Image (spheres, helix red, strand yellow):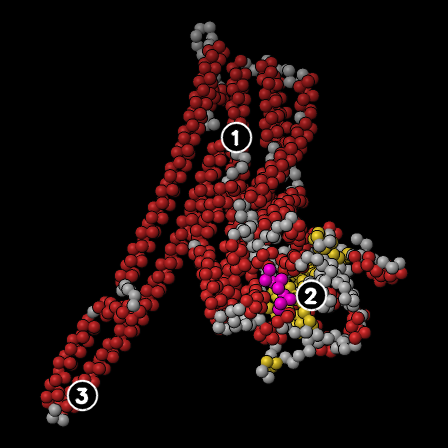
């Protein structure tokens, strides 16, 4: 688009009194990274309290394919929101400012600029209509504006004046209405609402509270505090159970529950000059308050550094065009009187994005095939190798740009599109080869055809001359390079077209006897049969190559899909862990602040999240096998081949899947067994150490008792010494028993542990035996099932293969017998007619004729 000088436009519009038009005027500079706007434009219009999407703004978003960091600001009207957003854009002018008591910004305005710190990212600034405007008749309109701001942003800035006090929190009542204005899933039940609110964390933006014109000293009980500590102190719940306190605590609870990442920035007044405040956008930077400049710099630096791209959960990154789709989906839902549902929005976005991903991948495949292939190719394998490389790139592009293809319908569409394009290239390759080969043969055979028409070969010995000319044509044809995949087919077609001509020339050649003619005719048929067999083998080889390519394609789709599913699953688990950690943190904070009942209410929610997390973590193998069984079910269909080849290909893929499952299962069992052995060895080592310590302790006690007994005996206390004998004998007996039987000691120790913990704890031997027995039984069952499946598939495959071999052998033998019978019959007739003399004797034949006859009579190998 044409770049226009903004200053000249402003001067012209001011002169004509159309200042309002200046703010709507958007100048776009086309860049490699996407459009960067010189001036803001209205994204969501709010006319007569009805929301609508500006199509010009959508066109700008559609041209942005980069991830977007969406920073939105909300707050009461006339609190300086637009000025703060202009500073984020690095401009004094942009979002419209006003110094009167009336609201200037209507709807939601958008300004897309290049991100100052993140390459290949676009910073999208959203300035929203001020909340609480006196001219509005319906407060619900403010609620929808606020809900849209939350849904679209990755960083939400709430702007307020003065301090964070009771009044400021009451003015933020829109947060308490989010559970009524937003749904995660399309469920209208109370349980669904609770489940939605529990998962808001995964979709909601980071929260920043900007406190403007802050005049207080940042201390609590004479202790200096930071901006963030000031916010957290203001968000502490107020003790009490009456209705007023509960209403006051609701915004605090919602902020703490919905926004795990919170930040606060306090700003001094930009200037103390009241007149300059009315025209703050014209005040030079150096004339602003130094504290405000430093605070503003820290504010912008934090957003540029820590602001993340907008995501939709599970790692789905939002680009500019995706953001436009979300805006349309949310606004249309509001206009229809419905509650915006994130699940429906993601599904709508996925349908659009996945269709575009299929088209993009298919276009890339077609473009690369055209660039890399020069038709006709010398061999089919050459074309199939290029196809495999281009398909790999196309699948990677699809995987990169698609998401939420849970039923794999779009990947199937991609496979069908690539398969269709591949067949088109194969057909074009054959057509190019046919055209080129036919032109060569027409040129080489021109003289031969002219001689035939002129009757050159209709003379004695003409057949030999014809054969020499034809063989020369075939020889020269084979010397030509780059004929392509149809070279042999065209040559065979030429040879077949010459069969009748050669037969006519042969029969008319008077230099040959009838016997020689018959032998030559049979030789021609034999050569034709051999060439037909050769062509059949070539076609079978080509079919095998195509099947190998399809198998490689299947493996490539499987590998890339598996990698993508693994990444998505990891993102899901991380997201669930983050939500769970946040819930536990909020619960602990409530408990520490003395709100035990509120903390206990969260237990059900936390237990449910833990259960979901545990279920997703439980069995990775089962998760993968379900996916790939389903993928295999649709990847193995719609392959254009005969019924027998379809069945054989399906059998091969099933065998491969079975082998893969068995390998993964064996690996998993080996890891479990290794872990079990390590734990068992570690436990045994600890038990031996404890046993040694116990024996040392008993030995020490026994030595002490013996020493005391000896001292009493030495001092003359014989009676007391004798009394200790029983005790010493008992200790010695226990010591000997413990030394003798290690298993008894281990069982005794586990009994002691069980009695202390109040639970039943089996001994290591019993536990090991029980676990090993269970694992061995489970392994045997799985191996038995796998073996049965493998045997059934192998039996089917062997039966089909044996049947096919028998049919081919029978056909071959029948064909050979028929050829031998016909050959022998014709030879007998010709020999009888040509060689029998009047006196009934056979003439002597030359050695060469005898050899030729012997070679002809004995059936050759076809």
Residue nearest the observer in this picture, 142 or 553: 142
- Is residue 324 rendered to the left or right of residue 729? right
Task: Identify the magenta region.
Answer: 169-177
Give me the residue at 69% from left, 21% from top: 450
What percent of the width, then of the height, locates residue 59?
A: 72, 51
Q: Which residue is mark 1?
A: 536
Residue for badge 3: 708
Image depth: mark 2 or mark 3 in front = 2
Q: Secondary structure at mark 1?
A: helix
Q: Position of residue 382 (x, y in %)?
A: 59, 42
- Whether label 1 touches label 3, CB < 8 Å: no
Please rate how many residues cluster around mark 1, counting C-alpha atoms within 10 Å: few if below 14, some from 14 to 19, many from 20.
few
* Sequence-wise first label, 2 or 3: 2
Of residues 750 and 250, which is closer to you in this image?
250
Q: Position of residue 340 (x, y in %)?
A: 61, 53
Classify mark 3: residues with Cα within 10 Å, few (<14), some (14-19) or many (20+): some
Task: Tell which residue pokes out farthest to the right in this image.
Answer: 15
- Disc 2 residue crowd, few under 14, some 14–19, many 20+, Cα 10 Å: many
Q: Quadrant of residue 438?
A: top right
Disc number lying in front (1 or 3): 3
- Left or right of residue 627: residue 13: right
835, above or below 427, in the image:
above
Say which element carries label 3. Answer: helix
Work out whether mark 1 precedes mark 2 in sequence or the reverse, and give the earlier one: 2
The residue indicated by pointer 2 is 76
What residue is at 11 percent from the left and 85 percent from the top?
722
Q: Main secondary structure of the magenta part?
A: helix
Give the residue at x 31% y 51%: 777
Q: Is residue 543 above or below residue 504?
A: below
Q: CA distance from mark 1 to mark 2?
A: 82 Å
């Amino acid at each position: 688009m044409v770049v226009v000088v903004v200053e000249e436009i402003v001067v012209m519009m001011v002169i004509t009194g159309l200042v309002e038009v200046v703010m709507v005027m958007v100048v776009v500079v086309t860049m490699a990274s996407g459009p960067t706007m010189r001036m803001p434009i209205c994204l969501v219009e709010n006319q007569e309290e009805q929301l609508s999407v500006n199509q010009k703004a959508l066109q700008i978003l559609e041209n942005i394919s980069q991830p977007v960091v969406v920073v939105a600001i909300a707050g009461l009207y006339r609190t300086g929101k637009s000025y703060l957003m202009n500073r984020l854009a690095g401009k004094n002018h942009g979002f419209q400012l006003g110094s009167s008591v009336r609201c200037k910004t209507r709807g939601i305005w958008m300004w897309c600029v290049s991100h100052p710190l993140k390459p290949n990212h676009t910073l999208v600034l959203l300035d929203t209509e001020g909340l609480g405007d006196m001219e509005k008749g319906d407060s619900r309109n403010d609620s929808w504006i606020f809900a849209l701001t939350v849904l679209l942003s990755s960083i939400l800035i709430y702007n307020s004046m003065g301090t964070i006090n009771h009044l400021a929190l009451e003015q933020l009542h829109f947060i308490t209405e989010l559970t009524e204005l937003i749904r995660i899933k399309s469920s209208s039940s109370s349980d669904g609402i609770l489940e939605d609110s529990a998962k808001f964390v995964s979709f909601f933006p980071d929260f920043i509270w900007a406190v403007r014109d802050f005049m207080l000293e940042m201390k609590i009980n004479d202790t200096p505090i930071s901006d963030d500590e000031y916010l957290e102190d203001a968000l502490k719940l107020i003790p009490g159970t009456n209705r007023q306190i509960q209403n006051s605590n609701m915004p605090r609870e919602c902020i703490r529950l919905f926004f795990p990442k919170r930040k606060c920035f306090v700003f001094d007044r930009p200037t103390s000059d009241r007149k300059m405040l009315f025209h703050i956008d014209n005040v030079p930077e150096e004339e602003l308050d130094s504290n405000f400049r430093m605070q503003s710099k820290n504010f912008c630096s934090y957003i540029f550094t820590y602001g993340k791209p907008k995501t939709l959960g599970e790692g789905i990154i939002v680009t500019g065009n995706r953001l436009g789709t979300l805006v349309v989906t949310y606004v249309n839902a509001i206009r229809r009187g419905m509650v915006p549902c994130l699940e429906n929005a993601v599904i709508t976005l996925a349908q659009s994005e996945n269709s575009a991903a299929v088209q993009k991948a298919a276009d890339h495949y077609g473009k690369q095939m055209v660039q890399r292939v020069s038709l006709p190719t010398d061999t089919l394998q050459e074309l199939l190798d290029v196809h495999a490389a281009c398909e790999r790139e196309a699948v990677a592009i699809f995987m990169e740009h698609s998401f939420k293809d849970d039923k794999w319908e779009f990947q199937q569409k991609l496979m069908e599109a690539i398969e269709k394009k591949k067949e088109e290239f194969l057909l074009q390759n054959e057509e190019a080869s046919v055209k080129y080969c036919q032109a060569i043969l027409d040129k080489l055979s021109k003289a031969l055809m002219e001689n035939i028409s002129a009757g050159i070969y209709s003379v004695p010995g003409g057949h030999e001359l014809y054969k020499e000319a034809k063989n020369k044509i075939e020889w020269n044809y084979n010397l030509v390079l780059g004929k392509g995949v149809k070279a042999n087919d065209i040559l065979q077609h030429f040879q077949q077209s010459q069969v009748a001509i050669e037969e006519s020339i042969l029969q008319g050649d008077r230099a040959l006897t009838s016997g020689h003619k018959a032998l030559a005719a049979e030789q021609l048929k034999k050569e034709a049969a051999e060439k037909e067999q050769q062509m059949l083998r070539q076609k079978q080889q080509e079919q095998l190559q195509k099947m190998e390519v399809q198998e490689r394609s299947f493996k490539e789709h499987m590998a890339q899909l598996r990698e993508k599913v693994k990444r998505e699953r990891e993102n899901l688990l991380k997201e669930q862990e983050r939500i769970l950690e946040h819930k536990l943190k909020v619960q602990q904070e409530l408990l520490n602040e003395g709100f035990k009942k509120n903390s206990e209410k969260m237990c059900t929610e936390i237990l449910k999240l833990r259960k979901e997390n545990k279920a997703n973590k439980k069995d990775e193998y089962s998760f993968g096998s379900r996916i790939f069984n389903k993928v295999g079910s649709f990847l193995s269909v719609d392959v254009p081949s005969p019924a027998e080849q379809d069945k054989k290909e399906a059998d091969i893929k099933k065998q491969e899947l079975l082998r893969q499952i068995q390998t993964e299962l064996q690996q998993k069992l080996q890891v479990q067994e290794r872990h079990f052995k390590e734990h068992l060895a570690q436990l045994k080592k600890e038990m031996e150490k404890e046993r040694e310590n116990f024996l040392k302790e008993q030995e020490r006690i026994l030595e002490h008792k013996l020493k005391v007994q000896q001292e009493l005996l030495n001092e003359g206390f014989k009676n007391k010494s004798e009394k200790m004998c029983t005790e010493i004998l008992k200790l010695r007996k226990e010591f000997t028993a413990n030394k003798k039987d290690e298993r008894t000691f281990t069982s005794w120790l586990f009994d002691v542990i069980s009695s202390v913990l109040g639970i039943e704890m089996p001994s290591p031997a019993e536990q090991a035996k029980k676990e090993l027995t269970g694992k061995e039984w489970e392994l045997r069952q799985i191996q038995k099932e796998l073996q049965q499946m493998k045997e059934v598939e192998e039996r089917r495959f062997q039966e089909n293969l044996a049947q096919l071999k028998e049919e081919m052998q029978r056909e071959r033998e029948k064909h050979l017998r028929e050829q031998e019978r016909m050959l022998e019959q014709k030879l007998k007739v010709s020999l009888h007619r040509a060689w029998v003399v009047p006196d009934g004797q056979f003439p002597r034949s030359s050695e060469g004729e005898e050899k030729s006859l012997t070679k002809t009579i004995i059936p050759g190998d076809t």
